Image: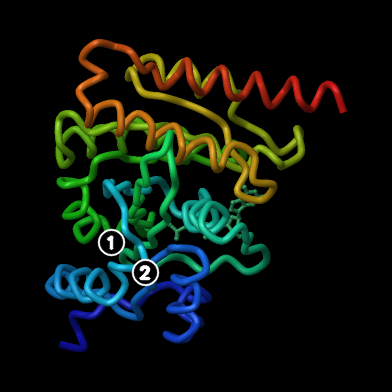
Amino acid sequence: MAENRIERKRVLSRKSKSEDVKSVIENGVSARRTTITNSNVVSSKAQLSHMYGSLTETDLTFKIVQLGDSGVGKTCLLLKFRDNTFLSGNFISTVGIDYRNKVIEIDGTKVKLQIWDTAGQERFRSVTHAYYRDAHALLLLYDVTNKISFDNIRAWLAEIKEYAADDVVIMLLGNKTDCKNSERVVRKEDGENLAREYNVAFMETSAKTGLNVDLAFTAIARELLSKNSGESNKSSFKVQDYIREQTQKNTCVNCTI
Ligand SMILES: Nc1nc2c(ncn2[C@@H]2O[C@H](COP(=O)(O)OP(=O)(O)OP(=O)(O)O)[C@@H](O)[C@H]2O)c(=O)[nH]1
């Protein structure tokens, strides 16, 4: 029913279906829908996998949900990761929820990441809560230039405790690190300390420059793969160690240029 429809966000809906199919063929990613209702999600996903299944054969699918206050950069992070594009200029808030798929390969295993982009605005909270439960991982974002978005992380973590599975993998991301130092109001150490307090992984990102964007999703995928294979019980994969190694590697590469 029309009144039950949750209109999707902006620019993302501009692609035509044929363009989406082309994108699937070229990039191995799934198409987007133009509207989502709670009741049609399952059938739409089934239709998509029926339509595009042979083009996106993967070994595993993981569901990742992005959370955080409105304006912290959730949609931009997803678009940077999937399409390597950045939406600058006018900010148009997400309405409801939307998702995109991206297939990545980790040590020879094809993993489909189904990434759900939620609206940060309070009025959509009851809609988005429904998507926490079966999420394998949650990316929780704040904006390093917005103290309130950081202070609200505790409230987000409380909601996660209430609505998500007990063993969900959580990663805290401080986004917009490309902004000038004078604009930054949340220090990296503050993010690290909060993440340590809640025993979650942490890194800083920029959806604008792409800093650590791929790494955030790859680290999550590796952690989920390790969990899936039962490795995490033996503590053989430590996501925060992996992040540290990878960021150090990147820093060293930059040093030698
Ligand atoms: N400088 C900078 N701006 C960013 C970055 N990420 C997002 N933005 C800007 O921040 C604004 C909000 O970005 P969105 O991705 O739409 O935010 P959101 O978290 O999806 O917001 P909701 O949809 O309301 O939940 C936009 O104007 C973006 O251009 C970043 O890494 N750096």
Q: Quadrant of ligand 1?
A: bottom right
Say what amino acid the circle numbered 1 marks.
Answer: Phe
Residue 215, percent from left and from top: 53, 36
Is the CB atom of the residue marked by disc 2 within 8 angstroms of ligand 1's nearest atom?
yes
Say what amino acid the circle numbered 2 marks.
Answer: Val
Q: Secondary structure at mark 2?
A: loop
**Snapshot quadrant of residue 118:** bottom left
Residue 224, percent from left and from top: 30, 33
User: Which residue is outermost to the right?
Assistant: 257
Residue at numbered disc 1: 124
- Pointer 1: residues within 10 angstroms few (<14), some, or many (20+)? some
Is the CB atom of the residue marked by disc 1 within 8 angstroms of ligand 1's nearest atom?
no
Circles 2 and 1 in contact, beta carbons < 8 Å = yes
Residue 221 is marked as none
Q: Is residue 250 above or below residue 50?
A: above
Residue at numbered disc 2: 95
In the rendered structure, the answer to whether residue 20 lies left or right of residue 45 reads right
Q: Secondary structure at mark 1?
A: helix
Q: Is residue 210 above or below residue 120?
A: above
Q: Give the mark nearer the N terminus: 2 vs 1.
A: 2
- Front residue of 183/194: it is 194
**Picture residue at 56% right of the left edge, 61% below the top:** 83
Residue 253, percent from left and from top: 76, 25
